[in-house]
Amino acid sequence: MPKIIAGNWKMDKRKKEAFLLMEQVHGHLARKTHQNTVIIFPPYIYLNSFNVFLKDQNSAIYTGAQNCSSFAEGAYTGEISAGMIKDIQCEYVLVGHSERRQFFHERDEELAQKITQAIENELIPIYCIGETLQERENKTYKTVLENQLINTLQNVKGSLTNLILAYEPVWAIGTGLNASKEQIAEVHAMIKQICSDKLHLKNIPVLYGGSSKPDNAHELLSTQGVDGLLIGGASLTSESFNRIIDIAETITA
Ligand code: PGA
């Protein structure tokens, strides 16, 4: 099964650096054929010109937005709709990243509306879930993750067949401390089970995210149930992101 290697740039990179990084990843992919799917999530403001360049170059890179509005259109100052993201030729959108939940107070009901908007506009949503350190330590993490899945996904209108999930333990994001192989395998198996038993969703890819880097990419990508990586910090230099892309190829090949 091909893997998905996704780079979430968050609110990093000014214009010049952003273009350089995108071109370096594109150049790397253009040098040989790859079996895996590579997606970058730069800040909104770069997406249009990135896509003009990437489509013109027939690039293997896909792009996505880090967020979208839960509304279709209207008087929502500062928001960007899923339709607008589709219009500039993006393929993906992240929904429910823990930083959106934490700093912008996004809740399950709103996230369901965002996924509905994504689906209506033919974008592929990558829905992120993850427990905090406290929830991991007090052993409520399974319930927390199940609630994040069910409460959001059961309220989505439209077909979820193209959905992608990302398991990102909050305590592993940007901390340098990735979850162990055993912890990841346990949660990914549970997520797939819930998808199939309670949501009637089969073959949903589940990505892992949280301190992925070239040094642990092989182990993470070869862990049972891991269909790819959602990478923050290590997607911000072409050296580390391109190395992870290459490592993923050795596993898929
Ligand atoms: P990280 O971030 O790789 O820097 O831990 C992952 C994410 O937030 O998606």
Image (cartoon, helix red, strand yellow):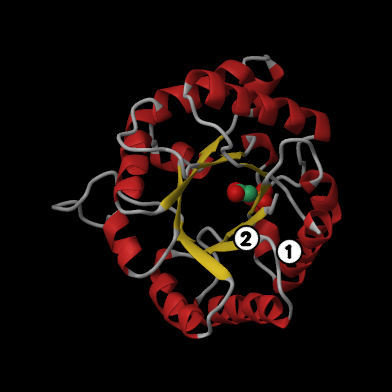
Q: Residue at x 54, y 26 (%)?
A: 195
Q: Is residue 203 above or below residue 120?
A: above
Could you say which is closer to the camera, residue 65 or residue 164? 164
Relative to residue 58, is residue 183 depicted above or below?
Answer: above
Disc 1 element: helix
Above or below: residue 56 compared with residue 112: below
Q: Is mark 1 within 8 Å of ligand 1?
A: no
Is 128 on the left-hand or right-hand side of 187? left
Q: Position of residue 62 (x, y in %)?
A: 53, 66
| Residue at the spot 41% in from the left edge and 30% down from the top edge | 153
Give the quadrant of the C terminus.
bottom right
The reply to whether residue 80 is visible in this rendering is no
Precedes in sequence: disc 2 or disc 1: 2
Mark nearer the viewer, 2 or 1: 2
Q: As rendered, which of 189 and 214 lies closer to the eye?
A: 189
Amino acid carrying mark 2 in the image: Thr
Label 2 element class: strand
- Residue displayed at 71% across by 78% down: 28
Identified by mark 1, the residue type is Ile
Give the residue at mark 1. Answer: 245
Q: Residues within 10 Å of mark 1 (few under 14, many from 20)?
A: many
Measured as percent of width and height from the top left, residue 186 is found at 73, 25
The CA distance from mark 2 to mark 1 is 9 Å
**Is the Cβ of the residue at disc 2 closer than 8 Å to that at disc 1?**
no
Q: Position of residue 91 (x, y in %)?
A: 44, 60
Q: Residue at (79%, 45%) from the top-left corner?
A: 220
* Residue placed most toward the observer, 176 or 3: 3
Residue 119 seen in this snapshot: yes
* Residue 90, image quadrant: bottom left
Name the residue carrying label 2.
37
- The reply, left or right, for residue 88 in relation to residue 179 is left
